[in-house]
Image (cartoon, helix red, strand yellow):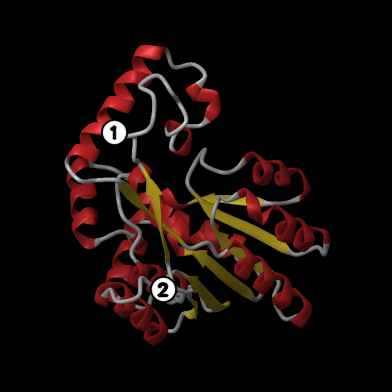
Amino acid sequence: MFTPKTDRIKEVAKSQSKVIEELKMLLEGQVRVYIDYGNAHKWSNRLGWHIDQKRIYQFLSSFDNITNIGLYDGTLQGDARSEQSIKDAEQRGYRVRTKPVKIMHISINASSISTTSPDLLKEFIRMALLRELDIKTIEFLNARLKELNQRGVYYVEERKCNFDVEIGSDMLLDLERGGTDCFVLWSGDSDFQHPIKELLLKSKKVILFATARRVATELDELRKIGLLIFDIAKIREFICWPRELAVGKAKGTP
């Protein structure tokens, strides 16, 4: 049963009735959802539009048989916007799992590096690609790093907050507790291969919500034993930012 939570969802559903019917067929029995929000947020760069936390909840909670929607997202401590986002998610009704985002400093200090050395570049470029680069390219990249050093920049920040273990554990715990027929995971990460396989072998329905052609090979192979993959581009109008919805209509995109 699909009961739109907002007038906007009700309006969009009129032109997206086929998608709603498809999801009603897929989301059988009692459904639990697990959203790796950090992972899903990164999809925006590839999709060209943003996934909105508020609209995801409004849309998914419109399906009466979705009993729980879990949101897994890191908190950037001291950042008011990040902290408020977590509070908003809890108030909306998400089952929120969060932990501090780790900020790692990665050195780009090239002062003691030979201009032809790939040692520093190994931190940023996969070896398979690095082997294909000629000396001139390596010299060029090292020169750019030294220019940054001259401007006082000796490291770059990398933010890390992985929820693979938490999500996988929660899925298997929910399996043990019973009462869930269908597990919906928003991610395309290969690290979920084990819990998904366990669920499928227990005759549970598992649906991966992800972007087209961006699913890890290890997960794609699980289609052979029942994994279903749903392209989130189909529900763009329900979950993207409002201003992007207006742009999409102007361009005639689905």
Mark 2: few/some/many CA within 10 Å (<14, 14-19, 20+): some
Q: Nearer the viewer, mark 2 or mark 1?
A: 1
Q: Position of residue 167 (x, y in %)?
A: 61, 68
Quadrant in which residue 10 is drawn: bottom left
Mark 1: few/some/many CA within 10 Å (<14, 14-19, 20+): many
Compare residues 185 and 37 and report the one nearer the observer. Answer: 37
Above or below residue 68? Residue 216 is: above
Q: Position of residue 96 (x, y in %)?
A: 48, 79
- Between the residue at mark 2 and the residue at mark 1, the CA separation in whole angstroms equals 43 Å
Compare residues 151 and 66 and report the one nearer the observer. Answer: 151
Q: Amino acid at mark 1?
A: Leu
Give residue 145's mark: 1
Compare residues 253 and 138 and report the one nearer the observer. Answer: 138
Residue positioned 40% across, 68% down in the render: 56
Q: Secondary structure at mark 2?
A: helix
Above or below residue 224? Residue 29 is: below
Above or below residue 216? Residue 18 is: below
Q: Which residue is mark 2?
A: 57
The answer to whether 43 appears left or right of 191 in the picture is left
Residue 1 in view in this figure: no
Q: Residue lying at the far bottom in this picture: please name it.
A: 91
Q: Secondary structure at mark 1?
A: helix
Q: Are marks 2 and 1 in contact (CB under 8 Å)?
A: no
The answer to whether 143 appears left or right of 94 in the picture is left
Q: Position of residue 127 (x, y in %)?
A: 54, 28
Q: Earlier in the sequence, mark 2 or mark 1?
A: 2
